[in-house]
Image (cartoon, rainbow, N blue to C red):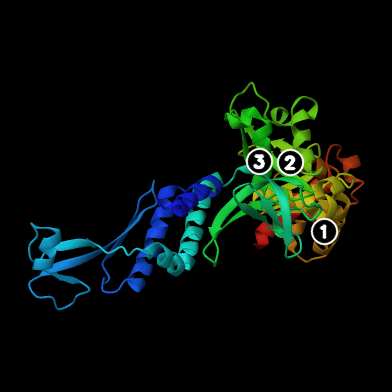
Amino acid sequence: MNKDLIAIFEYLEREKGIKRDIVIAAIEDSLRAAARKSIKGIGEKVTVQIHPKTGEIEVYAQKKIVEKVLNPSDEISLAAAREMEPDCNIGQLLEISVTPQDFGRIAAQAARQIITQKLKGAERDVIYEEYRHRAGEIISGTVKRFIRGRTIIVDLGKVEAILPERNYPKLERYNLGDKVQALLLEVHDTDTGGAEVILSRSHPEFVSQLFVQEVPELHDGTVAIEKIVRDAGYRTKLAVRSFDPKVDPVGTCVGVRGTRIKNIIRELNNEKIDVVPYSDNAQSLLENLIAPVVPRKLKMGDQKIFMVVADDDYPMVIGKKGMNARLIGQLLDCTIEVQKITEYQKLLAVQLAELSSSEDPSLDERLKIEGVNSLIAESLVGAGLDTIRKVMKADPAEIPVKVPGVNYYDLADKILEQIRKKKG
């Protein structure tokens, strides 16, 4: 029995999780190359067999039976062949045992480097088998060391994973030995022939999986996270939907008195999380995202949304350094432009002043504004504002007095839109 090989098999199975047949195949390949170099006259057709229980090594050379031997490495005479296999004939292939007594020692020296390379490949394959199907899961480990500044090597037990500096929030700090939870982002090959397990704590999916852990209704499919965006370390926004009319998706994710979401916020080091009801309608989803703010004016486009809000609501909608508006835009797959109502009214006043001084004769025709009903139009005419030019030159404060219930800036908006259509 080859006790050394048996010990290797058992160690690799126990410590590295590499199956015995994978190890045997790797060693057989390396010993085949060593046999060609160390055993004279055996040719290229060499077979090496290792017994999985005893570790015994057998080397066989395959030779063709011929009448006259011209190439001793690959051929054997019929007479010599029949000494080993009496029933053989010319043209057949014969496997001959050529295992030398000291082959174990010679082979070990010659094959050491090749075995190491093969076993690295086998270990890589084990990593793939164990971790590649777990991509998207949350996995736990211990901070083992730091490389290249703040990139963290995390000990997962059988393997080490990498948590790159870019994959966790800048505000987070770790020390050696700290426990860390992260998303298993991917497993990929390295240039050296190994494999790397890459983790992330900044990916939006990390937050999704934390919710799945805390909220059973997400796990069983009663509630679903339809969209999620994140500025790691600062704020996450997610839109959730319920497939059961009796289940409130937002309340389910938040939990009684916020118990569920508090656990997630704690794991994310107090990152802010906004949970809103999902809607297939973009405007409804936007309204859910900015509630309780109600926009004074809203223009929905495919790629851009323009919104006017009260001055007091502006900081809430924009957020710190524009983060809130940016995340809303990401969730809706468009850009968001937000303007204060006072700034918008000033801009309208400037545009109206410029247009009212133009020589366009249509501005002096009898008042007709698209989108304004005939009763309001007649009220404006009755108040002396019988042309678009007169409406544009009117004092914004006078119109609600002359025509109650009419907003000057709403009229101005419709007028400008009407003029743009005519020109466009």
Please provide percent x and percent y for residue 401. 91, 40
Q: Residue at x 90, y 45 (%)?
A: 312
Residue 289's disc number: 2
- The answer to whether the residues at label 3 and label 2 have Cβ atoms under 8 Å apart is no
Q: Decide: is 193 above or below 11.
A: below
Residue at mark 1: 352
Q: Nearer the viewer, residue 240 or 301?
A: 240
Q: Is residue 386 visible?
A: no
Q: Is residue 283 left or right of residue 391?
A: left
Seen from this angle, which residue lies furthest bottom?
70
Seen from this angle, which residue lies furthest top?
246
Residue 367's disc number: none
Q: Residue at x 22, y 62 (%)?
A: 96
Please provide percent x and percent y for residue 261. 75, 34
Q: Tell me the crowding category of disc 1: few under 14, some 14 to 19, or many 20 or more residues within 10 angstroms, Cα based.
A: some
In which quadrant of the rendered view does residue 209 lie? top right
- Real-space CA distance between mark 1 and mark 3, rounded to the nearest whole angstrom: 49 Å
Residue 208's disc number: 3
